[in-house]
Image (cartoon, helix red, strand yellow):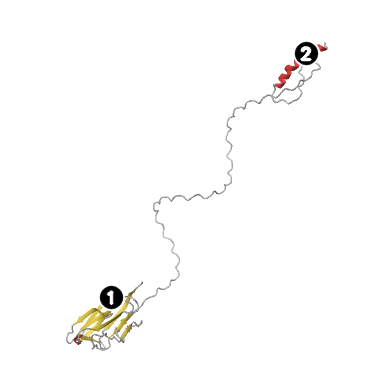
Amino acid sequence: MLLLQALLCLLILPSHAEEVAATEDLAPTLVPPPKGTCAGWMAGIPGHPGHNGTPGRDGRDGTPGEKGEKGDPGLLGPKGETGDAGMTGAEGPRGFPGIPGRKGEPGEAAYVYRSAFSVGLETRVTVPNVPIRFTKIFYNQQNHYDGSTGKFYCNIPGLYYFSYHITVYMKDVKVSLFKKDKAMLFTYDQYQEKNVDQASGSVLLHLEVGDQVWLQVYGDGDHNGVYADNVNDSIFTGFLLYHDTN
């Protein structure tokens, strides 16, 4: 009788071991005997683990989370290349006048070139064809006029103005203004008997350093009626207008 029960138990064990092997992720521990088995039952050898199943499908997207806090600024990137110049825009409206600036420092005064003379005749002229010596000095601060010769000597190159006013008495007058031994201007006045007359002339001349300018009676002795006394003057004047800049 005992032998028959042992054989029945052996027949039952293989089918129960197959059920245990088919179960996934079971620990390799001894399986308790099923209920209702016979006495003296013994567990079989654990079966091999089964193969992993195929991966499942992706799940649905979750709901967006709350907005995170602003992060710290990143590092400054390298300087980019200079771009092409854009088109000139339209001129804007005129702005308001600015506040006047401070007064500047006084500059150096420009050098002033001076050359002038004004002289008069003290006695009657009797000698023609020589420079008339005007010895009454009204102005000759630069000493560019020489009373001993009656000539003006140019010391500053530039443009000069010359004029003369001659008292005519007792004879006709013919006078000329000379520059470098060349007559530049002529004046003639015919004397009216028992009367005092006036002859005058003026001219602009460009002079170089060393040029000389003077007045003289030309012609014969019949035209030297240039006159001066205590109440009548004959005057010769000249002055620099513009000095040369080069």
Spot the residue most to the right.
2
Instruction: Quarter of the image for the C terminus: give it.
Output: bottom left
Q: Is residue 110 left or right of residue 151?
A: right
x and y, in percent, of residue 41 in the image: 79, 18
Residue 101 position (above or below residue 37):
below
Total count of labels: 2
Residue 143: which numbered mark, if any?
none
* Residue 118 can be seen, yes or no: no
Q: Quadrant of residue 117?
A: bottom left
Dot 1 amino acid type? Leu
Secondary structure of the residue carrying tag 2 is: helix
Q: Residue at x 26, y 82 (%)?
A: 215
Closest to the camera, between mark 1 and mark 2, is: 2
Callout 2, which amino acid? Leu
Q: Are marks 1 and 2 in contact (CB under 8 Å)?
A: no
Which disc is residue 8 wearing? 2
Between marks 1 and 2, how big is the CA–CA gap? 160 Å
Q: Which residue is mark 1?
A: 204
Determine the image quadrant of residue 107: bottom left
Return the residue found at the far front.
Answer: 181
Most extreme residue toward the left is: 193
Q: Position of residue 213 (x, y in %)?
A: 29, 80
Q: Position of residue 165 (x, y in %)?
A: 25, 81
* Picture quadrant where residue 232 is located: bottom left
- Sequence-earlier tag: 1 or 2: 2
